[in-house]
Amino acid sequence: MNRPLLVLCALAPEEWALRGGDWANALGGPAVLARTGMGAQRTGRSVSGLLSVGDRPYSAVLLTGFCAATVPGTRPGEVIVADKVQSVSGCSTATRSPEVLAGALRGLGLPVRVGALYTADRVVRGRERQELHRAGFAAVDMETAAALAHLPDGLPVAAVRVVVDTPEHELLRPGTLPGGLRAFRTLRATVPALMGWHRAVSREVQPPLTPPTLPTLPQEAS
């Protein structure tokens, strides 16, 4: 039996954007959309609570929302699909089928970059962001690694973030508001691709069908 997709975001605007998307015909029933709150501690508590009910109530988890780009020239509204996520402690986690998700997003006409995501413990600006770019990270957020740390092994997980601020236009500087509106619309537009990824990974983890074992009749005594 297919179980629903769990979609996690941190902030109210992210939740509003996602709820406005087209979730029709979601595999396993309606996707469960939960807002964790900002930062690692709130995210960890929220994920633990969501997974404490029943035996593996979700078939896959998708971590999404907004992010800050580290790569110069990245534009607000560009979609970052994480192929790995690293925490401040250096723990690195690979995601499931990032190219499948990226392909589904490109099929919607969205600009997509696949790369590494860094989860920081504070807002990262200026020189720190430049250092993350030199280290090979495409974007930075504050929740994804914390969520991953509380998920069970074997559960398919993806992380997709929409750029809201860039090295050229950092948060709360001129240009952020138009970029935020563009990111909001883009996040809403990703929903069909998120469901497409869920269908793809659900097929990957389905157990193979085996023929039923027929009962053996007892032999008559001779």
Image (cartoon, helix red, strand yellow):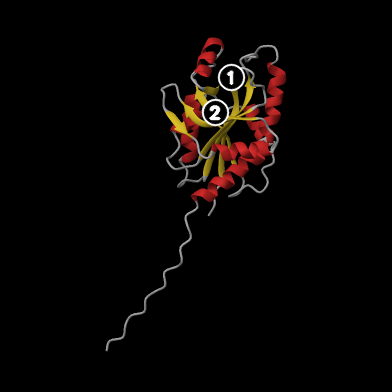
* Kind of residue at disc 1: Val
Query: How far, Cα to Cα, is label 2 from label 1?
Result: 11 Å
Q: Which numbered disc covers residue 71? A: 1
Left or right, residue 85 beside residue 163: left
Element under label 1?
loop
Residue 13 place in picture, x, y as percent: 65, 27
Residue 53 place in picture, x, y as percent: 47, 43
Element under label 2?
strand
Please indicate, yes or no, whether residue 141 appears anywhere in the rendered image.
no
From the viewer's perspective, is residue 51 above or below residue 217? above
Please indicate, yes or no, whether residue 166 appears anywhere in the rendered image.
yes
* Kind of residue at disc 2: Gly
Quarter occupied by residue 91: top left
Q: Are marks 2 and 1 in contact (CB under 8 Å)?
A: yes
Q: Earlier in the sequence, mark 2 or mark 1?
A: 1
- Residue at 44% x, 34% y is 150
- Front residue of 31/192: it is 192
Q: Quadrant of the C terminus?
A: bottom left
Residue 218 place in picture, x, y as percent: 33, 80
Q: Which numbered disc covers residue 39? A: none
- Residue at 51% x, 13% y is 128
From the viewer's perspective, is residue 64 above or below residue 140? below
Tell me the residue that label 2 is attached to.
Answer: 115
Left or right, residue 93 beside residue 104: left
From the viewer's perspective, is residue 207 above or below residue 102? below
Left or right, residue 77 beside residue 136: right
In the current view of this chain or complex, which residue is farthest to the top? 127
